[in-house]
Amino acid sequence: MPGNIGVPTSDEAFAEELKGGEKNGVPTSGAFAEELKGGQKRPAAKPTKPDDGELRMKRIYVVGTADTKGEELAFLADAVTAAGGVVVRVDIGTRGATVPVDIPASEVAAHHAKGAGAVLGIDDRGAAVAGMGAAFANFVQSRNDIAGVIGIGGGGGTSIVTAGMRALPLGLPKLMVSTLASGDTAPYVDVSDIIMMPSVTDMAGLNRLSRTVLHNAAQAIAGMAAKPAPAAAGKPALGLTMFGVTTPCVTAIVERLRADYDCMVFHATGTGGRSMEKLADSGLLAGILDITTTEVCDLLFGGVLPATEDRFGAIARTKLPYVGSVGALDMVNFWAPATIPERYRGRLFYEHNPNVTLMRTTAEECRKIGEWIGGRLARCDGPVRFLIPERGVSALDIEGGAFFDPEADAALFDAIERTIKPARNRTVTRLPLHINDPQFAKAAAEAFLDIAKK
């Protein structure tokens, strides 16, 4: 491999680069060079618990398993420092660090709900990884000096670091250099904004390619931390949920509100609802128009685009102005027909495309859906307006449509009214309209504007 791929290709060359002075205009410390030459190893640079004065300075947390990835962790920390970042080295290993760190694994593990003993010194590696992930998530939420987080890891390290990253607010820089980054990253990223960067080679010691990858990662996190996005100015943001079968409604609502609000539309595919509620929990939304609550169907009846049990949880926690409806509660989503569970054979289906099959919900299923949604919204103390379109809940649930079923819809509507527990700040309104009628969109927009003013 050529030697000019962006960083020095040997320990000696990198040692020369970090002797001191400047490289590419950035002061360098020479700390890693001394280690490479066999000199004295650097001391931990920062106290593990910064005082109030120090917390005014934001830091980049460099995280990894210092027992198995110590050399890479030290290299990455020095590279971030060379790029201008103020570094905190965090160990999430379970077997003892091989390089100096600022936050030892014992301190991270102590943030586990059951104490460090639930993480360290146990023989079950899977339990230790899961425990350290939970502890690291609690740990990062206890800190108020984080400008960004960069992690390195294989399977275990990636699981631990991303558990903490997912607990951090959207917008805070998060970069994970991982051996798993070129595969299915959904379990690690979920609904967060983690950047997954492939390590290309395994992390089993440094080589010319891994130095390049880690150098580039260090530059990226340092740049993001140094130049954070400016605070959003102007119009407040709204979250809206939409499916193809409710698009006319949501599009019309956006047209009515976009002059005064930044409208963020989320595809109600399971991750869409979770993403919207994550933004709500992060304080980035001023209100929600949850027109399409269809993810609940898949949660309750085994569809492929489910909500989680925490659906509507952010509404209760944040008390944001909320307008909801029953969009696409007439369907459960499956992939191609061959994937449909045997217990549903013989039901009413609609082939949305060759890879997506929709199943019409029955009256009994609609009753359960309505009770589930109503029960969740009954816990919300913020302003809630729930609108029921009596003439159909989707483009398929319309007179003459494939899923038109007034009996099933009636069971849904009655269950919601019965369980939502209307109160001064929480109302249910029936409208003699279809969900995609322009007048329904107008009513939803006006309902939101009414509670947003209060």
Image (cartoon, rainbow, N blue to C red):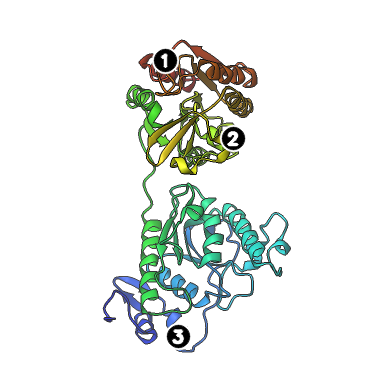
Q: Pointer 1: residues within 10 angstroms few (<14), some, or many (20+)?
A: some
Q: Residue at x 41, y 68 (%)?
A: 199
Q: Pointer 2: residues within 10 angstroms few (<14), some, or many (20+)?
A: some
Extreme residue toward the front, this view: 346
Q: Which mark is residue 317?
A: 2
Q: Which residue is mark 1?
A: 399
Compared with 425, 192 (above or below) is below
Q: Mark 2 or mark 3, which is nearer to you?
A: 2
On the image, the x and y values in percent for residue 291 come to 46, 26
Residue type marked 1? Glu
Q: Mark 3 or mark 1, which is nearer to you?
A: 1
Q: Is residue 337 visible from the viewing direction of this image?
A: yes
Residue type marked 2? Arg
Residue type marked 3? Leu
On the image, the x and y values in percent for residue 113 come to 70, 54
Q: Which residue is mark 3?
A: 36
| Label 2 vs 3, first from the N-terminus | 3
Viewer-closest of 185 and 329: 329
Viewer-closest of 57 and 450: 450
On the image, the x and y values in percent for residue 195 come to 41, 56
Compared with 224, 299 (above or below) is above
Q: Provide the secondary structure element on which disc 3 rests.
A: helix
Q: Provide the secondary structure element on which disc 1 rests.
A: loop
Q: Pointer 3: residues within 10 angstroms few (<14), some, or many (20+)?
A: some
**Distance between the Cα atoms at labels 1 and 2?**
38 Å
